[in-house]
Amino acid sequence: MADLKLTLVVACALVDADKRVLIAQRPEGKTLAGLWEFPGGKCEPGERPEQSLIRELHEELGITVAEPCLAPLIFASYGYETFHLLMPLYICRRWEGQVTPREGQTLAWVRANKLRDYPMPPADIPLIPHLIDLLM
Ligand code: 9L3
Ligand code: MG
């Protein structure tokens, strides 16, 4: 297999008081439009992954997360045609501000054992059992 560019993307499972997880449906015009994902995005050069995730959560959802509230759970790894995606999933149970879709996404709070009802990008799907183990 050809050497693919490694892309680090960070993602977060926000968990509410009822142990439901936030997923976001990628809007029209973006890659993977229509699929439901754990919110997050690309880690920019020079950013630590936690800083990227805090930035992405603020940009996409309007919330403020303190770094100690991010706990790493598991890494996803997926080979797309043109790049190799490496994606740590963090859990976050505390944040400030109201979760608001700021980029045209549709949001859903879902129990971990119902996540499979939502079509997800291939990188996100193997993360589901880890959330079920943690939350159910
Ligand atoms: N991606 C997959 N699952 C996720 C996230 C946040 C991102 N949970 C993929 C979609 C894109 C790439 O990573 O191919 C970069 O994400 P974005 O910057 O378009 O959100
Ligand atoms: Mg994103």
Image: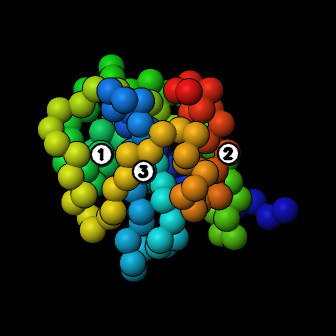
Rendering coords of residue 124 (x, y %): 59, 50
Comparing labels 2 and 1, the label whose residue is closer to the camera = 2
Q: Are marks 2 and 3 in contact (CB under 8 Å)?
A: no
Question: As drawn, which residue projects farthest toward the right?
Answer: 1
User: Quadrant of residue 24 in the image?
Assistant: bottom left
Q: Judging from the image, what secondary structure is the residue with disc 1 in? A: helix
Quadrant of the frame with the C terminus: top right
The amino acid marked with disc number 1 is Leu
Q: Are marks 2 and 1 in contact (CB under 8 Å)?
A: no
Q: Judging from the image, what secondary structure is the residue with disc 3 in? A: strand
Rendering coords of residue 71 (x, y %): 44, 24
Q: Residue at x 41, y 36 (%)?
A: 20
- In the image, residue 18 above or below residue 9: above
| 117 horizontally vs 41: left or right | right
User: Quadrant of residue 85 in the image?
Assistant: bottom right
Question: As drawn, which residue projects farthest toward the bottom?
Answer: 29
